[in-house]
Image (cartoon, rainbow, N blue to C red):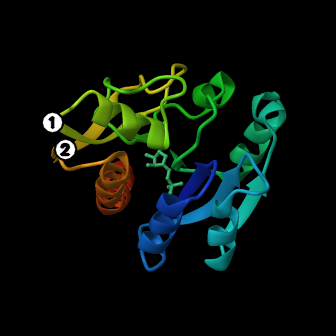
């Protein structure tokens, strides 16, 4: 059987993207076929190239054009589109074209600490400021609103009084590295 095709969108560093690419490098089930980034300076591009995965960059305008990124995606024939640290709102035409095939990871326990402007370090700083006792990760389907699609998976981690935004970020990243590839694998297996 042909391998399932994973396409990743990322905006910056791309450690999750790299982790997912590596996880599926020896997989018989799936492979990452394309990484898309909305900045030519995104570190994720270098990470993908080093692992021999094709990359594409685009502007915000191209993301929303009816014959922009959506055309590239259709020709990439993805079984799953994964947003891994992707910070722009996702266009409705792409969501409609790929129903139930687009997922996102968020570094908190949604519905808490989601929405516009809530990403990366900002999330962890707010968790610390609010003296939360736990935080975690949420993997969810993408719909037209930031961080509001149906939840697929959550995992929690305690926040200690000694924790800082930086230490929480580390804990959350560890959860992401452990669970995101496994959840992707589970979704693709279900499809078979
Ligand atoms: C990850 O922690 C991801 O959950 C978060 O950005 C980080 C990207 O790290 N995403 C969001 O905040 C989306 N709202 P990475 O570039 O090293 O993978």
Q: For the residues marked 2 and 1, what is the alpha-carbon distance in whole angstroms?
A: 5 Å
Image quadrant for the C terminus? bottom left
Q: Which residue is mark 1?
A: 133
Residues 60 and 32: in front is: 60
Q: Is residue 129 above or below residue 172?
A: above
Q: Is residue 134 above or below residue 183?
A: above
The image shows residue 41 at horizontal and vertical percentages of: 76, 57
Residue 1 makes an appearance in the image:
no
Left/right of residue 37 with respect to residue 81 in the rendered view = right
Residues 75 and 61: in front is: 61
Q: Which residue is mark 2?
A: 159
Residues 35 and 107: in front is: 107
Residue beneath the point at 65% across and 58% down: 35
Q: Secondary structure at mark 1?
A: loop
Q: Are marks 2 and 1 in contact (CB under 8 Å)?
A: yes
Residue sticking out furthest to the top: 145
């Amino acid at each position: 059987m042909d391998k399932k095709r994973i396409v990743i969108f990322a905006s910056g560093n791309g450690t999750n993207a790299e982790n997912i690419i590596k996880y599926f490098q020896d997989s018989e089930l799936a492979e990452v076929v394309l990484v898309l980034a909305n900045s030519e300076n995104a570190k994720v591009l270098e990470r993908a190239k080093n692992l021999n995965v094709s990359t594409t960059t685009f502007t915000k305008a191209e993301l929303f054009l009816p014959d922009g990124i959506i055309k590239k995606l259709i020709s990439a024939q993805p079984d799953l589109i994964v947003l891994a640290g992707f910070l722009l709102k996702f266009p409705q035409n792409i969501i409609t074209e790929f129903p139930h095939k687009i997922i996102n990871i968020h570094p908190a326990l949604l519905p808490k600490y989601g929405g516009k402007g809530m990403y990366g370090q900002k999330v962890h700083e707010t968790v610390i400021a609010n003296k939360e006792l736990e935080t975690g990760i949420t993997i969810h389907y993408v719909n037209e609103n930031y961080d509001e699609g149906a939840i697929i998976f959550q995992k929690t981690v305690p926040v200690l009084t000694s924790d800082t935004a930086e230490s929480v970020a580390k804990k959350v990243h560890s959860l992401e590295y452990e669970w995101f590839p496994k959840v992707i694998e589970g979704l693709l297996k279900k499809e078979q």
